[in-house]
Image (cartoon, rainbow, N blue to C red):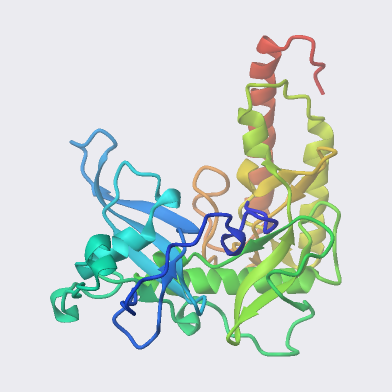
Amino acid sequence: MVKDDSLSYDNKTSAPDPVMVKNDWLTYGDEKVTHWTPPWASRPNYAPAPSEPNGGRYLYTSMIIESSPGRKLHYMRASVEDQDPMKLNVRALVLQVMGLDEAALAAGGATRKPKTELPADGEVGGMPLEIDMALACPKYEKGSLRLNELDEFQKPGIITFIKKPNLLCYKDPADRDASRAYFANEVAVMDMLHDKPHGNIIKCLGVVVKKGYIFGIKLEYHAVSLAQRCADKTRPLDIDIGKCIKGIADALVHLHDLGYCHNDVKPDNIVLNDEDTPVLIDFDSCLPIDQVLGKGTTPGWGDDESTTSNVKNDWLGLALVEQHLRKARLASLHKYPSVTSS
């Protein structure tokens, strides 16, 4: 999870790219783009290739960037293997696509490569593709939600995290539509829980709206997941296992009483607050009981044969979480024998 206090893409501390000289804008359209932000999300993409060391042949890195002025979101693909994509100089990438270089720009003699010679926007070697919010995000109907509409920069007095749809799949229509549907589902569940809260369920403060579409949900932020805590070998795993499992069980009973199942209970979807109280997160698989699953359970953390939302998914997932937690505790005891078992 990424908190929005100085860690979200809107608050990056990176210095802005220098403004283009001689009115040579970093775009082919009418919009005057003077610089692009570093990526605020990125993902390497591979094709199956067992002969490769990592089991896949590198294809490209997809990234989400923002133009300035205008603050419009764009999707871009580039070949940047073996580089940290979050530190990329997007300006240099765009200049390369356009066939420009800094020396020629400074001298005032720069000439863009004709747009007709470039691949389509959003393809490798092509210009950034502007994201259509109507395709990526669920529509916002004013007054239709219990949740408040919030400004993404609004600071509510606690550290928060803005969860957004998965824009990295924007170029794939099927994956993009699925991402929008999963996100809309999570918005609906958070809205349902707004006036039916539970201490072991993540608190949603409201929705972030852009151009009439729900771009994000603002959630309370907790820095460490149960999965991370179990994997941390730098300190003993001194969590009260009984308290942890009971807390999530209570959260699940609350959901079930409301007619819903979480359907994706696993260590990654449980975070710990400062007192190590467990908090259930990620409700994009949460559906009314007996409804056909959409995103469904994570393989290995529920009933892999299940096709509907049901309590078996949740209780089996929780049993596997407890098994995972006790196994991690046993490993911790070998390194830190003074830790008491619970």
Q: Quadrant of residue 165?
A: bottom right
Q: Quadrant of residue 142?
A: bottom right
Residue nearest the observer in this picture, 109 or 169: 109
Residue nearest the observer in this picture, 100 or 196: 100
Taking the spot 69% from the left edge, 46% from the top edge, the residue there is 270
Asked if residue 43 lies left or right of residue 222, the reply is left
Q: Position of residue 273 (x, y in %)?
A: 79, 44
In this view of the protein, can residue 37 be seen by the observer? yes
Taking the spot 26% from the left edge, 54% from the top edge, the residue there is 79
Q: Position of residue 134 (x, y in %)?
A: 49, 84
Asked if residue 66 lies left or right of residue 204, the reply is left
Residue 244 vertical position relative to residue 192 in the rendered view, above or below: above
Q: Position of residue 256 (x, y in %)?
A: 77, 61
Residue 3 vertical position relative to residue 69 in the rendered view, above or below: above
In this view of the protein, can residue 124 be seen by the observer? no
Taking the spot 29% from the left edge, 46% from the top edge, the residue there is 81
Taking the spot 62% from the left edge, 63% from the top edge, the residue there is 163
Q: Position of residue 210 (x, y in %)?
A: 60, 81
Q: Which residue is situated farthest in the left direction here?
A: 117
Point out the image quarter for the C terminus: top right
Q: In this figure, what is the number of numbered marks?
A: 0
Residue nearest the observer in this picture, 127 or 302: 127
